[in-house]
Amino acid sequence: MPFTLFELATTLGVVFGLFIGHFVLIAGAFYLGFWVLGRRRLAPRRIQQQPLRAARPRKEFAFSVLSIGLFSVMLTGLWVFDHYGLTRIYWDVADYGWTWFFASILVMALIHDSYYYWAHRFMHHPRVFRRVHKLHHEFHNPTPWASYAFHPWEAIVEVAWVLPVALLLPIHPGAFAAYIVILTVLNVISHLGYETYPSWIARWFITSTHHNLHHTRAKGHFMLYFNIWDRIMGTNQHDYEAMIETINARARAARGQTPTEPPRGEVHVTRI
């Protein structure tokens, strides 16, 4: 049975409302906590101590809203595909059990992480970068509002992995929704501009410093969650882990504790 225009519009509105709603809550909470209320107290944990360019949260937010709008259109299209039985999306948890429900979230993360690494490297090809990815790199000093601040073409690349996954793997909408929330939280942390993780995490997982270095230097650090492909392919910055040690030492010194590592410099912005 075909959809009516009202049904499509209603579905799009619901998808967009849920997506933008959870993004505003999560990004807003981190922005308020770190950039507003904790601006002075957490200053030692600011990754860029002397940024060459000021943060631009309003422009970040505007482009994030645009990207979320495009995501919502594409996710609504996926729902239409499912309506005609063209996906493996299922609606009853009992069909595959709770074990697969939670395991599928991890599977999506691993697939998305690998896809993102290679898609991200592709977008750094000089011809592609200028037309697709350069806009995101204009936010040299990113805030949580930059998490989805993409050029429209990049927004399409960012979400393209969802369709083949829905066609090939049984995915419950609830598991996918949970994954999107997790994605947003970790993406916001990547764009936080403040480092809160201990240095040992840097070896295996992506931190705010990891992605901040990508914004400031415009090379390397292409991963989304796990520091796997960057390590395998040698695309980690040589001073990445040392930068986190420096930030943690600076924070300890600000609290009156003896730092275990001496300062090793700050992040320097590479103009694009």
Image: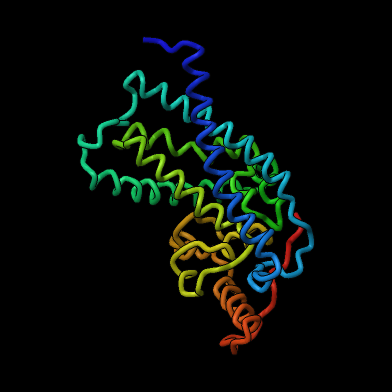
Q: As displayed, is residue 35 above or below residue 56?
A: below
| Residue 200 placement (x, y as % from top left) | 46, 74
Q: How is the image coloured?
A: rainbow
Which residue appears farthest toward the front when viewing the image?
A: 37
| Quarter residue 152 falls in | top right
Q: Quadrant of the N terminus?
A: top left
Q: In the picture provided, is 76 more to the left or to the right than 49? A: left
Residue furthest bottom as drawn: 258
Q: Tell whether 112 sits left or right of 125.
A: left
Between 38 and 180, the residue placed more toward the observer is: 38
Residue lying at 34% horizontally and 23% vertically, measured from the top left = 86
* Left or right of 37 on screen, residue 158: left
Residue at position x 63%, y 86% in the image: 256
Residue 138 locus on image (x, y percent):
72, 50
Residue 3, image x and y in percent? 43, 12
Say which quadrant the C terminus sits in: bottom right
Q: Say which of 130 and 23 sits in front.
A: 23
Q: Nearer the viewer, residue 165 or 25?
A: 25
Residue displayed at 58% across by 32% down: 69
- Residue shown at 39%/35% (left/top)? 164
Residue 170: quadrant of the picture: top left
Task: Please tell me how many numbered marks the rendered image carries.
Answer: 0
Q: Position of residue 188 (x, y in %)?
A: 56, 53
- Considering only vertical position in the picture, is 271 above or below 77? below
